[in-house]
Amino acid sequence: MASQSFHQLRLSLCSQHSLEVINLTDQANHWLGEIQARNGLLILYNLHTSSALAINEAESLLTDDLLDHLRSQAKAGRTYRHDNLSRRVGVPADEPRNAHSHLMAIGLHNHELVPVIEGQLVLGTYQALLFLELDGPRQRSLQLCFQGECAPVDA
């Protein structure tokens, strides 16, 4: 008989580009297998304000279109009040000028919830779990949580 449990993992990512889409689906599936998840809910939570999460197609031409769309919404190099570090209190001198990244992220998600049935993520044919880097390259962290039934641990 499966038991109710709660599992969590801090997932570290290292982006390579200023704007980038990273497919997390395989990593999430691997972790669900490690914890022997059966039925429940996977929660992905982004710990940053200049990146986002999405469920969408991971096809490379579409992800290029997505990044072009985001670039058009908030352009780097424009004058933003947030980037005027002399007007901000308690900001390190090396603080990035990244208002455009925050503005891109504001209309996106910082979390995603995905059902898990019989150990499998419930995703549509073309759906994937995507991390959207909007201010890279950087080291990033996500919190993954699973609430639900896991296979019993062999004694």
Image (spheres, rainbow, N blue to C red):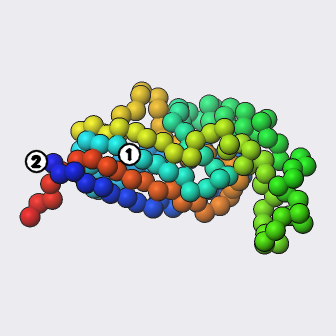
Left/right of residue 150 with respect to residue 116 in the rendered view: left
Residue 129, given in percent of the width and then of the height, sits at: 48, 41
How far apart, in angstroms, are the residues tagged by discs 2 and 1?
20 Å
Three-letter code, disc 2: Met
> In this rendering, is residue 126 above or below 23?
above
Indicate which disc residue 1 carries.
Answer: 2
Indicate which disc residue 72 carries.
Answer: none
- Given the current orientation, which residue lies at the most extreme front position? 89
> In this rendering, is residue 89 above or below 24?
below
Choose between 152 and 63: the one closer to the eye. Answer: 152
Instruction: Name which quarter of the figure residue 120 lies in.
Output: top left
Left/right of residue 78 with respect to residue 96 in the rendered view: right
Residue at disc 1, secondary structure? strand
Residue 122, given in percent of the width and then of the height, sits at: 36, 34
Three-letter code, disc 1: Leu
**Neighbour class for label 1 at 10 Å: few (<14), some, many (≥20)?**
many
Residue at disc 2, secondary structure? loop
- Residue depicted at 72% across the width and 37% down the height: 70
Q: Which residue is mark 1?
A: 42
Left/right of residue 57 with respect to residue 119 in the rendered view: right
- Given the current orientation, which residue lies at the most extreme top position? 125
> In this rendering, is residue 35 above or below 40?
below
- Residue depicted at 66% across the width and 38% down the height: 107
Q: Is residue 154 visible?
A: yes
